[in-house]
Every structure is written in C-alpha cells, then in structure tokens.
Amino acid sequence: MSYIKKPKIIRDNESRNKLGMTVTDYEGVMSTLCAGCGHDSITGAIIQTVFDLNIEPHRLIKLSGIGCSSKTPAYFASQSHGFNSVHGRMPSVATGAHSANSELFCIGVSGDGDTLSIGMGQFTHAIRRNLNMLYVIENNGVYGLTKGQFSASADVGSTAKKGAANLQIPIDPCQVAISIGATFVARSFSGDKEQLVPLLKAGMMHRGFAMLDVISPCVTFNDHEGSTKSYLSTRETKREALYTDYVEPFTVIEVDYDQGSSIEVDLHEGGKVILRKAEKEFSPLNKSDSIRMIRESADAGEMLTGLLYIDENQPDFTEVENTVRKPLNEVPFDDLCPGSKSLAALQKNYK
Amino acid sequence: MSKPGHNNFTVKFANVNGTGSSSANGMFMRSIFRMGIPVVGKNYFPSNIQGLPTWYEIRVSDKGYLAPSGTVHIMIAMNAQTYAEDLASVEPGGYLVYDSSWPRKELMTRDDVTVLGVPLAKMCNEKFDTARSRTLMKNTAYVGVLAALLDMDVSVIEQLLLDTFGAKKHLIEANKTALDMGYDYALENFKCPLSFRAKSSNKTDGHIIIDGNATAALGCIFAGATVGSWYPITPSTSLMDAFSGYCQSLRKDKETGKNNYSIIQAEDELAAIGMALGAGWNGARSFTPTSGPGISLMGEFLGFGYYSEIPTVVFDVQRTGPSTGMPTRTQQCDIMACAYASHGDTKHVCLYPANPEEAFYLSTEAFNLAEQLQTPVFVLSDLDIGMNDWMIKDLEWEDGYVPNRGKVLGKEELDNMENFYRYLDVDGDGIPYRTIPGRHPKGAYFTRGSGHNKLGGYTEDAAEYQDVVDRLLIKWETAKSLVPQPEVSYSKKNKMGIISIGSCNDAIREARDVMKKNGQSLNYLRVKAFPFSDKIEKFISQHEKVFVIEQNRDGQLHNMLITETDADSRKLESLRFYNGIPIFSKDIVKQIEDSINSGKAA
Amino acid sequence: MRFSVLDWFKDEKGKLTSKKINDVVIPCDTVILAIGQENSFPWVERDIGLEFDQWEVPVVDSVTYESTIQGVFFGGDAAFGPQNIIEAVEHGHQAAISIHKYCEKESLTDRLEYGMNLITAKMGIHEWSYSNDYGYENRFEVPTVPMNERFKDINIEVELGFEPGQFQEEVERCLNCDIQTDFAANLCIECDACIDICPVNCLMITDNDDEDNLRKKIKTPADNLEQDLFVSEDLPQTGRVMLKDEDVCIHCGLCAERCPTAAWDMKKFTLKVPYALDEANAIDVNATKKAV
Ligand SMILES: Cc1ncc(C[n+]2csc(CCOP(=O)(O)OP(=O)(O)O)c2C)c(N)n1
Ligand code: SF4
Ligand code: SF4
Ligand code: SF4
Ligand SMILES: [Mg+2]
C-alpha cells in the first residue's frame, strides 16, 4: 500500500488499443495489498488482457468474494462495474448478474480459501452451469487476509511460517473442475505473465466457464523456505504442459507453427488458441489425458501449468436454459407483463 | 359456528398421503364453489411423500369466512391409522363416512355421531382393473357419497370433470363411474340429503379459488420479474413451480421462442439470494422464494443487499420453526428474523399479505418498492396463504401500468454528468441514484459490503462510514411513506382494539363478528408493512387496550410494536397461536373474552 | 532589427564555424542592446609569455586552470569563453585548489578525485526523505513587475517570485534527479510488483539479449538511444535480468515501495566535489563514502 497515488502519465510512444485506450486507462485504484503480493501481478496481467482484447470497460463486470485476492477487482478496470460480494459466494452473484445480461464480459476473482473452502459449493455449481465467465483463483495456499492459516490448497508437508507442516491432502481446483465438467481449465503462475496473459485472454474469449488456477505467492505468510507455494518453490516445480498463444480474430499468424505438433482451437467469443507442444505428448482436448497428466506431474513433485483442458463445444448456461441471448434487463415491460386480458383468461382455470 | 346449516358446514377428509386424494378433495371443493357457495380448503399434510396421514378440511361458509372453523361436521375417514382421532374430532350431531369394505378391527363409534359405512374399496375393486385406478377412484367415489348427502348439483361436478380432464376421455369416464357409484350407494342406503345441504347460490361470482403461492407468482409475472432463483423448500416450492408454469405460456420470446426469463434452481439458499442480488444489481427484476431455514442461510447476503443497496424481492412463505420445525404447518414465526435479517444494524422492508389476493398485489408492489428503495424487500406470506386454496376476488390488472424502476440514471443523464457517484443523497430522501452495468461508460461504480463512503469508495473512516449508515436511516423514513398503509377499521365507540398481521385476518374478521353479536365490538388494525406506519402508534393511543394477535410463540409483532413505536406498551396484550394450524376464530373469541372477564382488559 | 540565423558546425580541422542561413527582420521602435561584454584582453601585453589561442583568449589547462605562465590562473569566461555562472564557480574552486597546491609546491595535477555518495531515502513503510508526489502542472511563469513600473527605478527587481502556494506546487514538479533507483539483483524474487506499478512503464524482467532487443522488451520501449539502458546482473531465481530505461523515470519511488525485498531502493545521490580546504586537510572524499 502506498500513500501516493500512482501518477497517470501517458507517454507519446505508449501503445494504444483499438479503442484508443492505454493500459493505464484499464487500471484501478492503488492496491492496498502487501508489497510483492502475487495477486497484484495477476491484476497487472488482467489489465493487460482487457487492454489487449479491446474490451470496452463498461461492458465488463468484475466480481469477487472476500479475501486479499477478492480485493483486487478494485485495482483494475476502474471504469468497469465491480462487485465485491461475500466470502465464497461470488459465483452466485455472477450467475444472477449473467442471467440479467449475458452479453457482458464477466471476470470473477477469488482466492483458494474463498473458492475451495467456504465457496466450494458455489464454485462447483457455476462449473456445472457452464456459466460464461472467466474465474480466476489467486491461489497462495493460505488465507492471506486472516493472517496465514492453511487453506484447502496447501500441499501435504508444506510448512507454515512458524514451522508447522500441513498434514491434510490438498484440493486441486483443476482436477475438481475437469472432473465435474468444466469446459476450460488452466493453471499458471503470477510470476509468469508470458504464460498467464494468453491464458487469461483465451479464458475470456471462451464461451462457458473458464477456470484459471493461478499460483500467487503470499509474500507475507507463505513465501518462506518450506512453503510449496513460494516464488522460488513454484518456479522450481512449475512445468509447462503446452505453450499457449492467443490469436486475435482476423490476425495473420506470423509465427511458424509446426502443424503436426500444434493444436488450434477456435474460441466462441472470438479468436483462437494455438497450443504448442512442450516436452511430453499431451492433448488438452481429452479429459482423462488431462487428469492423468496432472496427477503424474504431482506424483513427480511437479506442478503442471498451461491450458490443461478445453472443450469449446459445450452449450453455456444461457443456451442450456434456452434463455434469450439479448439482455433480459432490456426486454420491454410490455413483453414481460401479459396484461389484463391474459389475467382474466388465465383466471378461468381457477373458477 | 358449531351447528351446521345450509351452506354452512365443514367437511374434513382424513387420507393417507400419496393416494391421490387431493384431486378428489379439490374436486369437491371446486364443485361447491361453482355452485356459488363460498368455500375454503385447508390442507394439513405431513412432511413426507407417501404413507403418512394427511387431512383436508373444507369449510363451506355462506358468509365467506375463510379461516378454518375448528369444527368438523362430516368426516371422511379414509385412514385407518387415524380413525380414532378422526372420529373424536367430529362435532356432536355430525357424520363420519368410512370405507366399510372390510370390517375394521376396532370400529369405534360414538353415540352422538352418525357413522356411515360405504364399501368404497369393494365397489372400486369390482369396477376398476389397475391398483392405481382403484385407489384413485375410491376418492372420487366418496365425493359421490358427499354429493348425495349434501344434495349437490351433480351437473356441476360433471362439468368440472370435463373441464379438468379435457381430452382424457378415459379419465372422465372412470371418474364419472366412481362418482355415480358413491352417489347411488348413498341414495340407496342413507337418508339423503342431510339436515344441512349445499344449496346453489351466487356468492362466488367474480371470485376464483387459488393459493397464495400461485398469486404471488402471478405478481412476479405481472411485475415483470425476469430472474427467479430458488432452492426447493416447503412451503415455497409451489411459488416457483407456479412462476415456471406461467412463464411457459406467457414469457416466450415471440421471435425466437426462447425464454424471456431465467429460473435458476440454486445449489442452496446462500446461492439463491446471491443470484437474486446479482440479477437485481444488473438491472433485472429478480426474486427468490424461500421459507424460514432459507432466510437463516441468506442472512449474510441480505445484510449485503441492505448495505450495498441492491433491489430484489424475497418471498418468505413461513412455516413452523424453530429449526426444521414442522415444515408443512403454518406459522408467522419469521417476522423478526426477516425484519432484522443479518448481522449489524440491518433492517428490511417487509410486506405482510393476508391472503392470496393480497399476495398478488403486494408481490407486484414489492418489486416497485425494492427498486424505488434500492433494497431487498420481503413478502412474508405463510403456508396457510401460500399452499391452501382460498376463495378470493378476481385479480385485476390495469393496462398501461408502468413499473416504478426507481432512480436509475439513463443515457442522457449520464451524458450530462461530470462524474457519477453511487451513494450520494442528491434528493434528500436517502435514496441515491444507481446505474445499470453495461449501459454507459460513465456509469461504472464499485459495489461492496465493506465500509464505503458516499462516493462509493472503500473507507474505514469513522465519519465517512457513519455518513452512509445514517443516510440509510433517512431512506428508512422515506420507506415509511412508500410502503402500504395498515388496514384500519375504527369506531370511536370502541375502547378496545386488535392489531394483527397477515393470515390471521380472516379468523379475526369472524371473531369480531361473533363478539359484536355478543355485545363486544373491537376495532381492528392490520399491519401491512414494516417499517411501521405512524397510524399504528395512533391506533394504540386511541384505545385503552389493544390485543396483538399473531401466530408465533414469542409475540414477535408485539415485541416489534414495543421497540419500533413509541406506543404505551402496557396497553398491548399479546395473544399468540402457534400450534401450526391456522387460527380458529373461536379461539380468538375465547382468549379475548377470557382476558376481558378476568379483568385484565380495561 | 535584422538578425542572422546561423548554422554552427565543426570544419574539418574541428574548428567551430558558422554559416548564415537567412536573415530575419523584426520591426522595432527602439532597440536596447543588453547582451554580455566581449571576452577581450587588449590590455595584456603579448610578449610576457602568455599564449593566446585563435579567439584571442588565453590558453588555459582544463584541469589545473593554469595558463602558460606558471602561477597565473584563469577562470570564468576568461578561461574558455562564455559559459554560465555555475561553471564559473567551479572554475574558481578548481583554480583555488591549484593555487593552494602551487603555494604548497605540490603537483597541480595530483588532485583529489570527485566522489559520490548514495544513502537510502527510505524512512518508513510509505515514507521517503524526499517528496515523491508527481506534479502534473506545467511550469509556472514567475510573476513580474509590469512593464511600465519596471523603469521607474533602476533598483526594481523585475521577478517578483512565487506566492507560497504556487511555490509549493512548482517545487513538486521537481523530478528528484538527486534520488536514484538502486537495484540489488541478489534480493529480487521476481514478483513483478515494480514492473506493474511503474507509472512510466520503464522496467522489465526478461531473458538477457542484445541491447536492441532488450530495449523493445520494456512495456513502453526505451527508444532514446542516447540514454544508456540499465541491465542488471542475473536474477537469482531464473537468471533473467532487470531492465530499466532511466530516460523517463520520474523517481516516484513506487517501484521501491512495492518491492517486498528492497531489491529496488531509492537513494539520495550526493556528488562529492573536492575543495581547496579538502586538499589542505588531505581528506579523501572516497573514504567518507565507505564510512557511510
Ligand atoms: C462468512 C465469513 N467467514 C469468515 C470470513 C473471514 N475471512 C476473510 S478472508 C478469509 C480467507 C480468505 O482466503 P483466500 O480466499 O485464500 O484469500 P487470500 O486472502 O489468501 O487471497 C476469511 C476466512 C469472512 N469474511 N466471512
Ligand atoms: S497477506 Fe498475503 S495474500 Fe494478503 S496481501 Fe499480503 S501477501 Fe497478499
Ligand atoms: S522511480 Fe517510479 S518511475 Fe522510476 S522506475 Fe521506479 S516506479 Fe518507475
Ligand atoms: S518488486 Fe522487487 S522483488 Fe519484485 S520484481 Fe521488482 S525488484 Fe524484484
Ligand atoms: Mg489464499
């Protein structure tokens, strides 16, 4: 946290997006998180993402639960509508907001505590509904805001700052999400924007529930030796399953992709992802493959990152529910209220 | 009303649940209604799907009293398990009909009750092939028996069958056969009609028979609600069922055939209210129906909605508490829980319909109030209103009705605005302006349940925090002037009055009539909303004694009258009915008269 | 009044010469000539051993300020032609050192070196020993005495100075060039906080590369080639490097404030200029640096 506001300085050679906006225009108020908190880095990546995707700020809603991580929607896109809800229950608010207007872009930011403990129910049900949103878990293995208790994502043996080791098995949001039918599952690291930003973009442009588990070290309570979610430990164990590029719609692809070993997936909301092979043979289009790879990596003491699973062909919530695509909140009242004649007619059934 | 008379009697059906008795019982009730005789049905059913005792009580009342009478003139005793208690509950001089197909092991009789045995099962087993139809038709057959005993207009029942089953010819046939079977058996074997009968009249013209969950759902439809979220819970489930049913026919997009609504069955009530708030925040009219346990779960979010000022409508169809209580019995036990739902200084606008008719109008009103006041608004009905069939006046709707969406800034206003601040009290009424996400670049703001200042920014500053919560009190005052005013029946002559709420209304109406006849007139005020109107305080001050009648153990309304008004609490006497059964007027009369006689009342 | 617009360049011998490009005429009622006097030494005899250069200015050693006559020192405009007063003061200092050494019979060229000192400006978690807020205002014009008043008295000071409020704002515009960002690569955990916060996007962590590529990797590319690019030592966790484009840094200190490990620090820079007295006391200014 800082007393002074970050000055807004637009340089002559600053890049501008198609809306003529600069990255700075997508920033929010000054972060009040601890210096060096991974969450701030993710905020930076989200800012870059919405800038690059040329999203009109007022067409974006950003929601969160409670926690240090959940404070971050205030720190990006100040011209967007923010909703800092209650602990663990952002998915329900997103569901309602989405029902009222499914045309808006929706980013949900949560923590590992917010999602995997108090919010586990709502998290899984948002997946089940394939709600069209980008859901980012800023995963630091602890409850930051309540001062460093272990969260449900803490690995067995990972130690707390004062030395006690966690003995309970962790819940891996990626495995949970894939197994219950999430249509876009990825893992990344706050300290690797080159990987994170394309994943965020792809997640935004995916139609349906895009879940991104982002390891985001808590510098204050979980960045010591012995922690498995510190900057150092994450860097040591992180392994990329595939390299992900997001390609905007109507762009000529300049990079030479090896046709044989790269996979292209067109995204419903625009653009495509191109997945380039890393070391091992792996297809994120197959659930069993994904889960097997994640587990094998975990057994080998590694943490698999990248786009771990994608299925672009599932109907989203709006489609399944057969709801109109246009915003419900803009349907004229006359189309909603059946009027006196209808009322009289239907009351015949009650005579 | 212990002595039955023409068009003035109560029939109670003792059944086993899951045997399809409710449609037969409904058929009986609707036939009486179609004969032009006022009627009301009360369902006492178990929290179970099959095999437990269930009762349906149909009160035929020339005067149109809609509360249960508390007396039984004819008992249709179809449940061997409860036979003894059913027999015991019949008024002296009354009748009991039972299935005499096989001798009952312990056939108890009473000298003062006429027991009529009809071999229902035996007759049905001979006539119908499948087990299911035999069980079902037994029910229709006892309606036939009743038709004969009460000299009902059979053509009305036959027409009803046609209307109900429409194209399903085989069902019409079967029901008609069963009906005739019962009718004929009664004519042949009993002295028909009885001393009291159902005589065709015209008192139900311009009325319908409907339950309050259906009318509340209709209110949602007509108010233009588009997002409904819920988690199933008795007795509110049928509200969403009804909404969904109406949406099927009334809410399809003309071009695409897609839904102009979104019904979300949530994972729990914590989510249901979150969804309702999310949708309300995003500019849809939203609602969530629930009952007591749901309200408890929604607590945190309800306070969030109050503090961050998001419109939505919560229907609490109250059932008996505490805890799971008796899920299928009625009570008014959430009055305080709703009024002050959530931690912190929180209070909510609540509306208290008295019957299905009001449930419709207050439901539409709730959506207006929610958006005008930018806050969750509760509609507290109860199981009695919500799930029982009431006779109410035809619902009416004025075309050209414009919903009051409250202070929502439009494009032009925002265009002309330098900066938009969410929580500024521009007009002095405590209600700030809001914007709908996605509509205008200048409309963005941040919604949070944590401390915020009037500009919408996060704050931990003492003065800034207090500024906002104090402004919410100004809004509370404004709410007072916007919510429905109490219904008052006042005469200067009367020194005593009654204050009550919601579904107590009909029992009180009847009790006042009775007491008036007995020479004791009482004035009456029915609270229709919280925050309380000043009229309530005035009403109390105008009387020497005011009985506060409500359906809960702790006198919640009574307590709130003491804490929320400056009325002299010594004038208030709390009368509480909380056994889960709707109040009987005779119990009210007794308690009031006892109080007066004991000298407690002035 | 006619002005000539000149183009200055060095000829093949390295001599600064001018070429007239065109004339500009500015119509005036009155012309008052108010530029400095000429550098001219007609009063110095040309046979006393003092050498003059092609501009007719004495030849002076740029380190010792001694002329071609031992023990005769020059400074100010007289030394190297017209320069500003700040440099004249410096000449004075340097000449004083030389004079001291001359008198002490020491070698004039064996002088104390310039030193510098960096002391952290951090005082507390959000507190710095300098004002790090950024002033958006353009430069204020200093208020002046109206034209017609000025000539009433020769002693009238034309510039009135700032009002107290203006003065504060004007001072806030200072980019605090004396405050340097100082990077300790070994402390960096590569959390990106500094990069995300920098208001002028002048930082980046990336794989080391040749300079052209590195310059492009900064969020807003470092395209002023005259300004050196800062490239750190390899960072401990990934071996990448920290880049900084000093050209645009406003010394706001946010990078240091958001840095969890104090890998970035804001340090106050002091230039240690040796004076005659230091020579007299034989103080080694670099020794003080170590002592801090
Ligand atoms: C109902 C409720 N219970 C408890 C809390 C206290 N609380 C605030 S944040 C938090 C944990 C947050 O952990 P996480 O989601 O991992 O976020 P982080 O701070 O680590 O980013 C808890 C338990 C709360 N706000 N609400
Ligand atoms: S406590 Fe941890 S999670 Fe919270 S702001 Fe500080 S570093 Fe981030
Ligand atoms: S001092 Fe300010 S401008 Fe300079 S590098 Fe640090 S953050 Fe950027
Ligand atoms: S903030 Fe500090 S630790 Fe983090 S990347 Fe910058 S210099 Fe390194
Ligand atoms: Mg956490």
Image (tube, grey):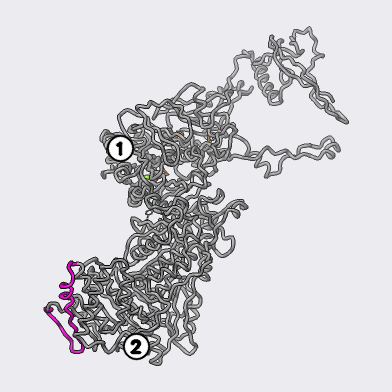
Residue A215, compared with residue A118, is above or below; it is above
Residue on which disc 2 sits: B594
Is residue B146 covered in magenta? Answer: no
Q: Is mark 1 within 8 Å of ligand 5?
A: no
Please provide percent x and percent y for residue B287. Answer: 42, 61
- Residue A147, visible in the rendered structure: no
Say left or right for B446 vs A350.
Answer: right
Q: Quadrant of the N terminus of chain B?
A: bottom left
What is the crowding at mark 2: few (fewer than 14 residues within 10 Å), some, or many (at least 20)? few
Callout 1: chain:
A
Which segment is the magenta one?
Answer: B103-131
Camera-nearest label, 1 or 2: 1
Under mark 1, the amino acid is: Asn
Q: Quadrant of the C terminus of chain B?
A: bottom left
Q: How far apart are the two marked residues, 1 and 2, measured between alpha carbons? A: 77 Å
Q: Secondary structure at mark 1?
A: loop
Could you tell me the amino acid type at mark 2?
Asp
Could you tell me residue C156's position as x and y percent?
81, 37
Residue receiving disc 1 = A286
